[in-house]
Amino acid sequence: MSKEKNVVTLTYGCQMSERDAETLTEITRQEGYNRTDDLEHADLIIVNTCCVRESAENKILGKIGDLKKLKEKNPNLKIAISGCMVQQPGALERLQKRAPHVDIWMGTHNLHEFSELLHRSDTGAKVAEVWQEPHETKESTPLAEKGKLQANVNIMYGCDNFCSYCIVPHVRGRERSRKPEDIIQEIKNLVASGCKEVTLLGQNVNSYGKDFDPPYDFADLLQEVDQIPELLRVRFITSHPKDLSDKLIQTIAKGSKLCEHFHLPLQSGSNSILACMNRQYTREYYLSIVEKIRELLPQATLTTDIIVGFPGETEEDFEQTLLMIGLGHYSQAFTFMYSKRSGTPAASMEEQIPLPVKKQRLQKLMSLQNEESYQLRQRMLGKCYEVLVEGPSKTNPDRLTGRTRGNILVVFDGPQEIIGSLVSLRILEAGSWTLVGELVE
Ligand code: 5AD
Ligand code: SF4
């Protein structure tokens, strides 16, 4: 009998990237590989990359460099690098020179060719495939890992927004929506294999179906997904504020499985910076959306992304961002220092902000948001929330963990049998990040 082959998948970046990594791992499973975390005994290591910020790229380059030692120890080891970093215009040649120990390079549009690329590398040949354009028919047949309680489902690919700091439209291509029937079928298949919660993924889910005729939009899709039997919860990310419709808020208010959580990236609280970022909304418009959500869905939670130190950001601009923290009442904010991405308009803007200033602003923003998160969790004390039980807590495996509809993590004691079901929990303790609850009969 031939030796079992092992694959380790390392993935970086957003949920789309995670979802791509799942597809790659599933392809290797079909090729006879077992999934493990043990790098020392791997026959294949996949590094699925992200290039949204320089810090991510440096971390990944370091990791790819480290893999050289493993390759020296085991010349049969195959190393495959995929994802956004490889897809950047002109990046492949540079990367190949820097990491000659890598066997397979592939861009974001080549996922479904992976088994073929694996076979092509069997002879020891170096393989590289980076298509400049997506191949739509291939995208409509994604592979997901089966049997998981929670799954990510792509509803669209790419982005048309070209925010001036962002590399994503350059590495993920133009916006394209998957057909509703394909999405619904994929979710039904996932549910049949034990999935209880899906997260619908798109760079901007609010522009889903923009080109469909007859018209069919994201709210229509949510309404249909809400009807799928045995599915317990539906989440979605990301919502560009400029395209969030009243119909969507109303649909979520009417739905039963549609979780009341909006990831609504603000990026900046200053109108002049928002304009330079090409975000296509003002702080006033953003706040009017927040108000509408709060009016129809008082229990909704909001999370956001914020960039500090965008070129030209003054102290006054930054103050405007700080003020938005108090107005948005976010349960969580993902905060970043602006990072120059070559090929984007912001990279060549004058008045780049010095690193120490960016660091200082980030610290200030983070501590303000931590206080906000703490207050929000304090307000949950003594109240009851519906939680989907996900499994043992990572930090305390004797306890269980799950999330509220608003995507807030709770730890609690309970029997293993309730994993995968909805329970009601009363909140007993609240810190900045974790909540401790107890089961309510
Ligand atoms: N620098 C810093 N943060 C960025 N993001 C995107 N591009 C950059 C960049 N060049 C952030 C945005 C986006 C999140 C996914 O990453 O906040 O919403
Ligand atoms: Fe990047 Fe803007 Fe598209 Fe989001 S909406 S992926 S920030 S270009």
Image: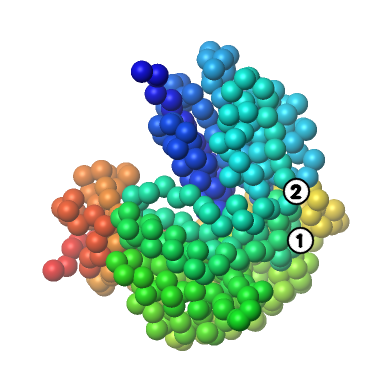
Crowd band around label 1 with a 10 angstrom C-alpha radius: few (<14), some (14–19), many (20+) = some
Q: Which residue is mark 2?
A: 132
Compared to residue 40, the image places residue 183 above or below, namely below
Q: Position of residue 120 (x, y in %)?
A: 63, 28
Q: Which residue is mark 1?
A: 164
- Nearer-the-camera pick, 165 or 319: 165
Q: Position of residue 243 (x, y in %)?
A: 62, 76
Compared to residue 106, the image places residue 320 above or below, namely below
Q: CA distance from mark 1 to mark 2?
A: 21 Å
Given the current orientation, which residue lies at the most extreme top position? Answer: 73
Q: Amino acid at mark 1?
A: Ser
Given the current orientation, which residue lies at the most extreme left position? Answer: 441
For label 1, the SS is loop
* Image side of residue 287 versus residue 372, left or right: right
Q: Residue at x 45, y 50 (%)?
A: 144
Q: Residue at x 34, y 60 (%)?
A: 191
Residue 60 seen from this side: no
Q: Residue at x 60, y 73 (%)?
A: 209
Question: Which-is-in-front pick, marks 1 and 2?
Answer: 2
Compared to residue 271, the image places residue 97 above or below, namely above
Image quadrant in which you'd find residue 388 = bottom left
Q: Quadrant of the C terminus?
A: bottom left
- Nearer-the-camera pick, 385 or 183: 183
Count the labels in the image: 2
Give the mark, 1 or 2, whose residue is nearer the N terminus.
2
- Nearer-the-camera pick, 45 or 366: 45
Image quadrant in which you'd find residue 75 = top right
Q: Amino acid at mark 2?
A: Gln
Q: Position of residue 9 (x, y in %)?
A: 49, 36
